[in-house]
Amino acid sequence: MATAAPIATDERSALAAARAPRAALRRVSGAVSDGAPVDPADLAPLNRVLAAGFDAIEADPTGRLRTVQRTRGHGPEAALLPVAASARDLLATRDPVLLHRRGNER
């Protein structure tokens, strides 16, 4: 049986960088689904990730304008940006009933 290759340092730091926003997202979504107040400190890790990107406007091949998301770099935050943006949209603009608590708290 083959053994897994050791994780490179940059991959380890990327994984570590993903843990804080993941934990914050769990707490925020849990509070929203429970109807409880959100701790503002839990928004900071998510906002750090969101700050890695920005919205822009571009024309599609037919000339129709659309909103696109761009990143400011290639670090861990840039990799997490699509997840954070989807979470932002779900938490801030959708019906909180769509969220539900999972039994797996990890």
Image (cartoon, helix red, strand yellow):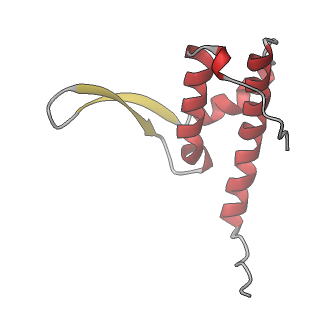
Could you say which is closer to the camera, residue 25 or residue 47? Answer: 25
Residue furthest bottom as drawn: 1
Residue 45: where, in percent of width, then height? Answer: 71, 33
* Residue 88 found in image quarter: top right
Q: Quadrant of the N terminus?
A: bottom right
- Residue at left offset 75%, top offset 19%: 33
Residue 8: where, in percent of width, then height? Answer: 69, 70
Count the numbered circles shown.
0
* 95 with respect to 42 (left or right): left
* Residue 38 found in image quarter: top right
- Residue at left offset 67%, top offset 54%: 14
* 92 with respect to 4 (left or right): left
Q: Is residue 13 above or below residue 79?
A: below
Residue 94: where, in percent of width, then height? Answer: 57, 16
Q: Is residue 101 above or below residue 19?
A: above
* 50 with respect to 32 (left or right): left
- Residue at left offset 71%, top offset 70%: 7
- Residue at left offset 60%, top offset 16%: 92
Q: Is residue 72 above or below residue 75?
A: above
Could you say which is closer to the camera, residue 106 or residue 44? Answer: 106
* 7 with respect to 87 (left or right): right
Residue 102: where, in percent of width, then height? Answer: 78, 34
Q: Quadrant of the C terminus?
A: top right
Could you say which is closer to the camera, residue 57 or residue 37? Answer: 37
